[in-house]
Image (cartoon, helix red, strand yellow):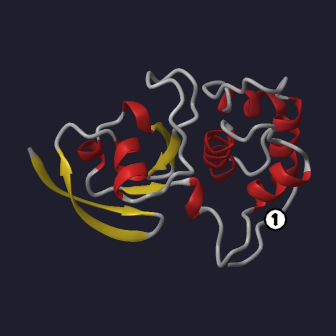
Amino acid sequence: MKSILRLSVNGKPREDAVADNALLIDYLRDTLRLTGTKQGCDGGECGACTVLVDGQPRLSCCTLAHSVAGRDIETIEGLSHTGNLSRLQRAFHEHLGSQCGFCTPGMIMAAEALLRRNPHPDLPQIKAALAGNLCRCTGYVKIIESVEAASRTEELAA
């Protein structure tokens, strides 16, 4: 069965016929072609699929699309404005926060939620915010340095 799903994705209202059992990650990647959100473990264990739902991090591989009807969804693609990287995206680039890049969108989205509620987090707060996101390439040092650098940078007006 399909039914109409109404929500906002990256600031744009959407209305799509979506299978009642479709996962949010499948809706984003297959229907909307927003492939920045990565499908890692399929079980809510790696965080690669993290998106923001009403500003809060959510694992899209464990979320039914229809359960977020009427809400605001943000993906990694929604963080850049007019072709300019967000402060977190810039910080990850400048401070080598990504290796293969597979976990990077989920890391950035989890960190974005943290910086919105606490613009200047300390190290334990950063580690706690990223605790649900796994990176198979690094020891997390550059990832944490990237978040710290972003917390010291003011976001440019869009």
28 and 64: which one is in front?
28
| Whether residue 15 is situated above or below residue 82 in the rendered picture | above
Name the amino acid type tagged 1.
Answer: Glu
Image x and y of residue 79, in percent: 62, 62
Query: As drawn, is 43 to the left or to the right of 118?
Result: left
Image x and y of residue 129, in percent: 66, 33
| Whether residue 90 is situated above or below residue 109 in the rendered picture | below
Image x and y of residue 75, in percent: 52, 54
Q: Secondary structure at mark 1?
A: loop
| Whether residue 123 is situated above or below residue 34 in the rendered picture | above
57 and 95: which one is in front?
95
Residue 71, quarter of picture: bottom left
> How crowded is the residue under tag 1: few (<14 C-alpha within 10 Å), some, or many (20+)?
few
Residue 132, quarter of picture: top right
Image x and y of residue 90, in percent: 81, 59
Quarter of the figure with the N terminus: top left
Query: As drawn, is 111 to the left or to the right of 6?
Result: right
